[in-house]
Image: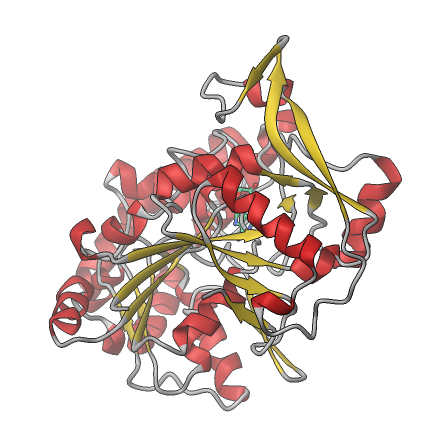
């Protein structure tokens, strides 16, 4: 391996962190390329639990270089706090955290506007994480954003802040009857934060491309999931970045011909947090029971996630959009106790069977899943370490998922611990 991209192939929360942490063991450098503090990546090592929001999960490995690419919406307040929390756990990032000067900064007004804009949508609200992601990327697209590199020049930073506040304070007053922001305290806070960020600024594209020439192994760590992609997801119920594999190129400055492998992480079932359709969603009491049993609550916001059966239509689409080389399937053990397990193989919509994820606006809400049902294996798989040792029915389940979606399965996870990982030969 030299370069691997890991992306979520569902709606985020596929337990990517566990897979990234595992693969980071074989990498020299791990780079985040999109999203920001909206992500919550949980890694469990023994009785210690770590939640990463902006820093690549590879920080757990003391010898790995951590990179934050230009595609990330960087919240410097959260970042410094995250660094301090890791330091308190004995994990130092000194000399091994590199940040692109082109990463856009999440400002205090982005966080406030994120909440106000979403609340103002009433029934149509997206259910954002409130981390300022949408408004930050909005400014990036409008070419008015402030970037990490602007922290190098106090005068320029102040000028950009002033121009932004001129606009944001008017919007806050006119649309939301909200108090304006004061420039001085923000400028002072960001200059202090800048003292910590500036030493990490690096030409990430140059660094990664040189590292590849030197034979270094690079892992690109995606956040969120394919159906939250701003272009290819279930718009408008999406996040504001490209969560799909192409984002690894645009979000770091590494060309597509340099990517060797793309691994899509899927859970053995489907979950979704926030608003938007979820065709295979469990009904009634079963929903509540499984959410509790599986502990499906967000690492960033604590919100309950909606749970449903594995949806092969979605993952087939993910395989195409991301050009997946293989799937890493997590939480197989979560299905151990079920008597029977369903897989959605196609949808029925307006009397027709469709095999492909619909492109027509709103049609997903009308889709009824067509299921195949399999008998459960009713065996504890959490201690299994070899693919051949899995119960026959569990292997059949995995085989069916691969056949229905396209890519082979390269990794199966049977628990949160590092060693609860099966590499499929
Ligand atoms: P935003 O990214 O905060 O703008 O939120 C937009 C949508 O993406 C909302 O439905 C969120 O719940 C969802 N979302 C954002 N980040 C994550 C994540 O890391 N996992 C799952 N859903 C997410």
Q: Is residue 293 visible?
A: yes
Q: Nearer the viewer, residue 310 or 162?
A: 310
The percent coordinates of residue 409 (x first, y second) are 48, 55
Q: Quadrant of residue 218?
A: bottom left
Is 333 rendered above or below residue 289?
below
Residue furthest to the right in view is 285
The percent coordinates of residue 81 (x first, y second) are 49, 74
User: Would you say 390 lies left or right of 192 here?
Assistant: right
Q: How is the image coloured?
A: secondary structure
Is 236 rendered above or below residue 285?
above
User: Would you say 101 lies left or right of 136 here?
Assistant: left
Tag count in the figure?
Answer: 0
User: Would you say 225 lies left or right of 335 here?
Assistant: left
Q: Is residue 129 visible?
A: no
Q: Quadrant of the C terminus?
A: bottom left
Q: Nearer the viewer, residue 115 or 329?
A: 329
Is 171 rendered above or below residue 303?
above
Residue furthest to the top in view is 351
Q: Nearer the viewer, residue 160 or 359?
A: 359
Residue furthest to the bottom in view is 90
Picture residue at 59% right of the left edge, 65% below the top: 413
Picture residue at 80% right of the left edge, 42% below the top: 287
The percent coordinates of residue 213 (x first, y second) are 11, 71
Picture residue at 28% right of the left edge, 68% below the top: 1
Is 9 rendered above or below residue 370?
below
The percent coordinates of residue 84 (x first, y second) are 48, 81
């Amino acid at each position: 391996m030299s370069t691997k991209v890991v992306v979520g192939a569902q709606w985020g929360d596929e337990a990517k962190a566990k897979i990234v942490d595992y693969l980071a063991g074989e990498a020299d450098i791990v780079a985040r390329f999109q999203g920001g503090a909206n992500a919550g990546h949980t890694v469990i090592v023994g009785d210690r639990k770590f939640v990463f929001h902006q820093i690549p999960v590879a920080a757990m490995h003391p010898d790995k270089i951590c990179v934050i690419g230009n595609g990330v919406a960087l919240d410097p307040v959260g970042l410094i706090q995250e660094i301090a929390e890791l330091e308190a756990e004995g994990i130092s990032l000194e000399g091994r955290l590199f940040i692109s000067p082109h990463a856009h900064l999440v400002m205090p007004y982005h966080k406030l506007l994120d909440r106000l804009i979403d609340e103002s949508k009433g029934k149509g609200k997206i259910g954002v994480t409130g981390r300022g992601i949408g408004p930050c990327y909005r400014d990036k697209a409008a070419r008015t954003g402030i970037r990490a590199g602007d922290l190098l020049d106090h005068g320029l930073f102040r000028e950009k802040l002033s121009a932004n506040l001129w606009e944001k304070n008017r919007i806050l007053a006119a649309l939301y009857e909200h108090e304006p922001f004061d420039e001085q305290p923000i400028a002072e806070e960001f200059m202090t934060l800048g003292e910590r960020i500036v030493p990490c600024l690096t030409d990430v594209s140059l660094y990664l491309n040189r590292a590849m020439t030197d034979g270094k192994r690079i892992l690109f760590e995606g956040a969120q999931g394919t159906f939250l992609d701003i272009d290819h997801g279930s718009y408008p119920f999406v996040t504001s970045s490209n969560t799909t594999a192409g984002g690894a190129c645009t979000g770091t400055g590494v060309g597509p011909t340099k990517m060797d492998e793309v691994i899509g992480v899927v859970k053995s079932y489907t979950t979704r947090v926030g608003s938007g359709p979820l065709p295979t969603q469990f009904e009634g009491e079963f929903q509540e029971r499984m959410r509790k049993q599986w502990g499906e609550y967000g690492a960033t916001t604590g919100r309950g996630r909606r749970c449903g059966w594995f949806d092969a239509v979605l993952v087939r689409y993910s395989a195409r959009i991301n050009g997946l080389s293989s799937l890493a399937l997590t939480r197989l053990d979560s299905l151990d106790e079920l008597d029977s397990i369903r897989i959605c193989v196609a949808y029925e919509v307006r009397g027709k069977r469709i095999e492909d994820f619909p492109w027509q606006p709103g049609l997903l809400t009308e889709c009824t899943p067509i299921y195949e049902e399999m008998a459960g294996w009713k065996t504890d798989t959490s201690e299994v370490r070899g693919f051949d040792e899995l119960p026959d029915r569990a292997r059949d389940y995995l085989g069916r998922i691969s056949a229905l979606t396209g890519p082979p399965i390269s990794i199966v996870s049977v628990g949160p611990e590092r060693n609860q990982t099966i590499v499929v030969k």
